[in-house]
């Protein structure tokens, strides 16, 4: 092979691998992107039951109920609307009423959000950025600096 | 006084860096040895001043000087001494100071051991290194000064974030930074080569040890971070595809590619232009990692601060260095001469294959990490790209790479014999087939993919050993002559085999943990027993204890197997009043390479407590594999050929400096 042919083969292989990667990326993105929504978004965007989403807001004070077998129920609020959430399992260290939370899962047909993941929060001051933005949008954000 | 001394030393370092940024390069242009020789002493002095600054901050922490804002924010007089010292880099300002300390250390090492480099190259490299240093000194002094005083001295500090109060923090950030910043040297070499418009095999001989050193530290740093997250966060996971993890993994992938392409360049004088590009990319990704973590665009345990000016400042540094380097590359790279010819089936070809897949895998992670940020900036839509994305893209791209790994070292340079190598790898293939069959028979239906992955792991491990066996003529000659051959092999051959073997080991651990790990989540009352993977774990009760700066809720669990008591496990939850926060301290029981993992959740009013119990088969292999890889790198690093100044074998003995 001449130098030119070799280079051509090399570039061809490279492009083939890149095309493969692009196909993988596109199909994976289609299947694994999860959109973030606040309780208000859930209503306004008419999110269908069964669609996997992230729900963020504050755990509404007074709404947390613990059941058997680590079952918990609480409401997520963005100050405008509330969504009931059901979760079974261990919640992160700083999950408590009045604090920010992100739950991942899907709505059931009755309008209850069935979460399979409650995202961990590491720091007392840390408010998930998405939650802060959602609260700002609803006009319920006070800078606590 | 001490804080001011540190501040002053840092300003002096900036002044030196400014001089070192211009004078040596001017000297290289005009061929003036006097100007060029400014670089060496200046680099050493820079390191000296930054070391003084770092020592000053450390002293402030050790004596708990809470008049310094940084110490007040992140320390507590009741903390153990070790954590007082590690808090120095457990916060944004201090960790940036560690960053420049390592940066100036590497500059000083080039100055100290680079006396046999061509004078202009040395001057240019040190000047470019100083550009980076200048940018980061300015960043620290303007936006993140750790030496600022408080107007009124508080009586007590606010304590270090409790999850960072751990021995893992003593090791993880310095190693990670040694890796990140180590790539700054290869970057400086690449830029210097582009400035000179000249590059030769001697250049690669210099660059490869730096890449290796950075890669070894980065490998250990990532592995350490992963193990720390595993036992400290209490979720039992060892890799989350979290953006911050990805930020360290991308430079690792690019660095691994660079390591391999530098071999081609050194041995065959080919792939020059590509190697230069990889050197630029590896450091660019390191800078981007710093940006992602430090700017606050990501919320995570690593994002200490959320100050937009810092983000903008780092973004400007990022844009200047990456943009400038790539522009210089586009302008100057075509001038570099073409290297040696080779057939597609050859060791060069295999290394190109390695580079292709590593960089592509790196690119998919790049997309998955930055796509949510880009989408939010452009459209305002908030999305998250989770682990499924990375598993779906990364795994298919890594499998072909792993298949080719054993071929690489066994193919000849220039033109290889694919069939011949495949024949020699039949043994490895046979072991793989047996591993697949055994796994499939034991684990049964539904484990086909896992069985193949285990087969692949064994194939990679045995393949690495096959290379050694071939080179020593093992079993074909008497053992003594094989032994003589083994002793004569260059250390880089052993290093390669060891690193590839470690890759297989890590893969084995990943597959076993992912496929056969078990998890039980339960609300347990004292006296209750949970069974997992043949262990009966009884909850005996809970006690409350007081630590130096926290209160602790400690559970006691007895682990039995077949009625025999194995071990008492004591996971705990700690709450830190000064931070109003709590941490989960998991308990681990190690049996061979597998672990039982218990972490506590919240107690409830009926006297029960939420408990997570995991059994993780062969999980230690994941980190052990990484350590073996790093050992391989270190062994290769100690190869005589890589010690600079190799052309003079007679004086090589005196030049054996460990730190190069």
Image: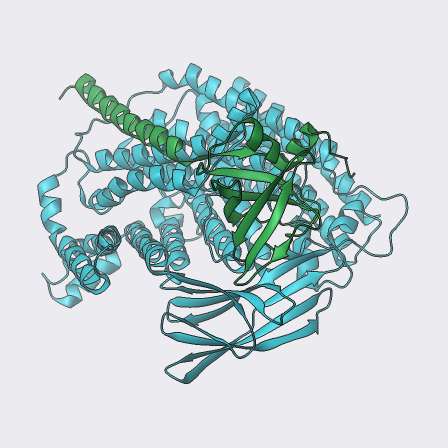
Looking at the image, residue B203 sits to the left or right of residue A111; the answer is: left
Tell me where residue A32 sits by quadrant.
top left
Q: Residue at x 34, y 37 (%)?
A: B393
Q: Nearer the viewer, residue B52 or B233?
A: B233
Residue B553 drawn above or below residue B404: below
Relative horizontal placement of residue B413, taking residue A135 as reference (left or right): left
The quarter holding residue B379 reads top right
**Place of residue B81 in the rendered image (x, y in percent of width and height, measured from the top left):** 70, 63
Q: Could you tell me residue B161's position as x and y percent? A: 68, 53
- In the current view of this chain or complex, which residue is farthest to the front? A110
Q: Position of residue B268 (x, y in %)?
A: 26, 33
Which chain is green in the picture? A
Scheme of image coloration:
by chain
Residue B188 seen in this snapshot = no
Front residue of B455/B505: it is B455
Q: Please identify which colour was used for chain B in the image.
A: cyan
Which residue is painted at 59% across and 56% down in the image? B170
Q: Is residue B330 rendered to the left or right of residue A19?
A: right
Q: Is residue B125 visible?
A: yes
Q: Residue furthest bottom?
A: B564
The extreme top residue here reads B331
Seen in the picture, residue A71 relative to B368 is either above or below; the reply is below
Q: Nearer the viewer, residue B371 or B64?
A: B371
**Image mark count:** 0
In the rendered image of this protein, does residue B276 appear above or below residue B404? Answer: above
| Position of residue B559 measured from the top left corner of the image (x, y, whole percent) | 46, 77
Which residue: 22% across, 42% down? B404
């Amino acid at each position: 092979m001449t130098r030119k042919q070799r280079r051509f083969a090399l570039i061809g292989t490279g492009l083939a691998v890149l095309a493969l990667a692009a196909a993988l990326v596109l199909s994976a993105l289609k299947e694994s992107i999860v959109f973030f929504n606040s309780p208000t978004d859930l209503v306004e965007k008419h999110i269908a039951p069964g669609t996997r989403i992230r729900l963020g807001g504050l755990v509404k004070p007074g709404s947390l109920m613990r059941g058997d077998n680590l079952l918990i129920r609480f409401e997520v609020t963005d100050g405008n609307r509330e969504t009931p959430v059901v979760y079974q399992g261990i919640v992160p260290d700083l999950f408590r009423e009045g604090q920010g939370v992100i739950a991942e899962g899907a709505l059931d047909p009755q309008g209850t959000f069935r979460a399979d993941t409650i995202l961990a929060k590491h720091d007392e001051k840390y408010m998930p950025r998405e939650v802060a933005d959602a609260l700002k949008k609803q006009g319920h954000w006070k800078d606590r600096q | 006084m001490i804080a001011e001394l540190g501040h002053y030393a840092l300003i002096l370092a900036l002044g030196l860096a400014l001089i070192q940024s211009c004078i040596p390069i001017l000297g290289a242009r005009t061929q003036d040895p006097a100007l060029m020789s400014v670089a060496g002493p200046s680099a050493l002095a820079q390191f000296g001043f930054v070391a003084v600054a770092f020592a000053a901050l450390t002293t402030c922490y050790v004596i708990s000087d809470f008049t310094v804002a940084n110490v007040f924010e992140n320390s507590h007089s009741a903390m153990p001494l070790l954590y007082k010292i590690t808090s120095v880099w457990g916060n944004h300002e201090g960790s940036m100071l560690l960053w420049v300390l390592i940066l100036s250390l590497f500059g000083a090492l080039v100055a100290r051991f680079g006396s046999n480099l061509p004078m202009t190259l040395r001057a240019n490299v040190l000047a470019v290194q100083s550009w980076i240093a200048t940018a980061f000194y300015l960043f620290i002094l303007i936006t993140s000064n750790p030496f600022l005083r408080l107007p009124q001295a508080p009586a007590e500090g606010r304590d270090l974030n409790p999850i960072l109060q751990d021995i893992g923090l003593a090791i993880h950030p310095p190693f990670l930074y040694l890796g990140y910043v180590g790539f700054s040297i290869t970057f400086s070499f690449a830029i210097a080569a582009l400035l000179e418009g000249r590059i030769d095999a001697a250049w690669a001989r210099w660059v490869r040890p730096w890449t290796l050193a950075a890669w070894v530290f980065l490998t250990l740093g990532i592995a350490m971070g992963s193990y720390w997250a595993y036992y400290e966060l209490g979720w039992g996971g060892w890799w989350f595809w979290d953006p911050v993890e990805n930020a360290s993994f991308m430079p690792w992938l690019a660095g691994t590619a660079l390591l391999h392409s530098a071999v081609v360049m050194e041995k065959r004088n080919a792939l020059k232009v590509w190697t230069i590009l990889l050197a630029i990319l590896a450091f660019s990704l390191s800078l981007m990692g710093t940006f992602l973590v430090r700017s606050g665009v990501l919320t995570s345990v690593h994002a200490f601060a959320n100050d937009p000016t810092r983000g903008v400042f780092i973004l400007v540094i990022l844009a200047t260095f990456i943009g400038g380097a790539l522009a210089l590359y586009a302008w100057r790279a075509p001038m570099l001469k073409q290297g040696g010819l080779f057939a597609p089936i050859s060791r060069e070809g295999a290394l190109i294959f390695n580079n292709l897949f590593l960089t592509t895998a790196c690119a998919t992670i790049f997309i998955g990490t930055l796509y949510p940020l880009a989408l939010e900036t452009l459209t305002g839509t908030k999305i998250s790209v989770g682990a499924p994305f990375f598993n779906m893209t990364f795994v298919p791209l890594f499998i072909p790479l792993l298949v080719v790994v054993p071929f690489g070292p066994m193919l000849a340079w220039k033109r290889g014999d694919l069939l011949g190598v495949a024949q020699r790898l039949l043994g490895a293939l046979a072991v793989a087939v047996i591993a697949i069959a055994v796994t499939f028979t034991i684990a049964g239906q539904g484990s086909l993919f896992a069985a193949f992955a285990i087969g692949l792991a064994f194939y990679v491990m045995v393949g690495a050993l096959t290379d050694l066996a071939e080179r020593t003529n093992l079993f074909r000659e008497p053992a003594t002559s094989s032994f003589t051959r083994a002793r004569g092999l260059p250390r880089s051959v052993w290093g390669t085999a060891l690193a590839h073997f470690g890759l297989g080991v890590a893969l084995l651990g990943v597959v076993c943990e992912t496929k056969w790990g078990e998890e039980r989540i339960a609300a347990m009352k004292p006296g209750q027993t949970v069974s997992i993977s043949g262990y009966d774990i009884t909850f005996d009760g809970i006690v409350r204890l007081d630590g130096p700066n926290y209160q602790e809720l400690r559970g006691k669990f007895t682990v039995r197997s077949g009625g025999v008591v194995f071990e008492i496990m004591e996971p705990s939850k700690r709450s830190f009043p000064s931070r109003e926060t709590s941490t989960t301290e998991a308990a681990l029981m190690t049996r061979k390479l597998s672990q039982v993992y218990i972490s506590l959740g919240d107690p409830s009013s009926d006297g029960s407590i939420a408990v997570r119990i995991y059994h993780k088969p062969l999980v230690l292999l994941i980190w052990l594999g990484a350590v073996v890889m790093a050992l391989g790198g270190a062994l290769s690093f100690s190869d005589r050929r890589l010690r600079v100044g190799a052309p003079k074998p007679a004086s090589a003995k005196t030049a054996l400096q460990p730190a190069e």
